[in-house]
Image: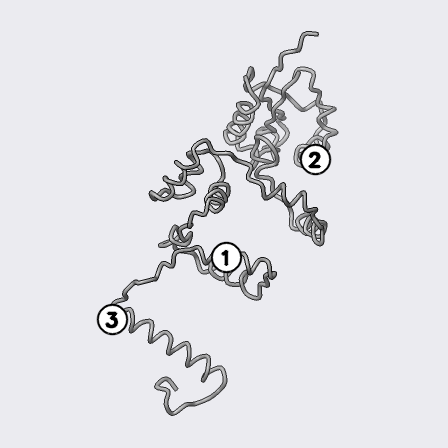
Amino acid sequence: MRRKKLNRVIYRFWHNQSDAGRVGYIGKDSYHPERYRFSSRAREKNCRKLHRAFKKYPIKFWRREILASNFKSDSALNKAEIFYINKFDSKRKGYNCTDGGEGVRGIVVSLKTRRKMSRAHKGRKQSSEWVEKRTKPRYKFKNPQNLIKLYLAGQTPRQLSIKYKVSTTAIRGFLRRNNVVLRNRSLARQGMRLSKAHRLAISRGGKGRKFSKIHRLRMSKSRKRQIPTMLGKRQSKATRLKIGRANKISAHNRWHVERGVVSPFCNLC
């Protein structure tokens, strides 16, 4: 039996009853879009905005148009869907719920749904086979020694991830498995200015946070591998005076102000 050739297309559903309707919904199809009826699409609930729009506006107002067709592969079709969603801005102004492409990338999940997902996964035990499967490396690099040489030469995991077309997590995991000492990640953030609200959010998130014994052991192990940035570094006289003054103020607040003690030997009391 002769196999039918797939007709991969990018289509758009739209209507003239609202501003969001004029932008519409951008989607992809790999079979026969000419047979793709509005009634069958209206029954699907995977995109809540489009489902609500079909319930609000009768099918007689809806139109369909083909934006692009004859794609040779699914990857090209996914890229085209992302392009047209960005072009029409249909995620913000229309009925798209995601950024397009494969999966649900860019979907916004409500706080209520996130709490439900959290409760469903809490206390869930994973089998030893599943843990072993997760920890196995998913990527096999063609020239692993070349990747290590590039990292040691000064390239960042981000630059290597773009070159090898994998995530930065995969690059770091590969380097750790090959006993490569990773550079301090905080160096990449040096000079970055964070807003006051951002700094407060980071502070609140870290306060009172409890780690399990296994997590603490992993953190200790990873930090032992890191090269200390301040080792052997000489500070100027002015910097040393600033550090000393800051330490004195901190000690004064901690031991005298908070306890209501006045010491005759303290210059700040």
Q: Secondary structure at mark 3?
A: helix
Left or right side of 102 for 121 = right
User: Which residue position is annotated with label 2?
Assistant: 52
Q: Quadrant of residue 233?
A: bottom left
Give the number of the disc on residue 99. none
Q: Residues within 10 Å of mark 3 (few under 14, many from 20)?
A: few
Residue type (three-letter) at the residue carrying disc 3: Lys
Residue type (three-letter) at the residue carrying disc 2: Arg
Q: Earlier in the sequence, mark 2 or mark 3?
A: 2
Query: Looking at this view, is 207 or 47 the one in front?
Result: 207
Task: Tell me the mark number nearer the camera, choosing from 1 and 3.
Answer: 1
Task: Tell me the mark number nearer the camera, choosing from 1 and 2.
Answer: 1
Given contact means CB atoms under 8 Å apart, are the residues at marks 1 and 3 in contact? no
The N terminus appears in which quarter of the rendering?
A: top right
User: Which residue position is annotated with label 1?
Assistant: 221
Q: Residues within 10 Å of mark 1 (few under 14, many from 20)?
A: few
Query: Looking at this view, is 50 or 204 the one in front?
Result: 204
Query: Looking at this view, is 211 or 231 the one in front?
Result: 231
Cα–Cα span, label 2 and label 3: 68 Å
Q: Residues within 10 Å of mark 2 (few under 14, many from 20)?
A: few
Q: Secondary structure at mark 1?
A: helix
| Residue 103 in the image, given as x and y percentages of width and height | 61, 34
Give the number of the disc on residue 237. 3
Q: Earlier in the sequence, mark 1 or mark 3?
A: 1
Q: Residue furthest bottom?
A: 264
Query: Looking at this view, is 91 or 130 the one in front?
Result: 130
Is 223 drawn above or below residue 73 in the view shown? below
Left or right side of 263 for 27 = right
Instruction: Say which residue appears at 28% left-offset and 66% top-offset.
Output: 235
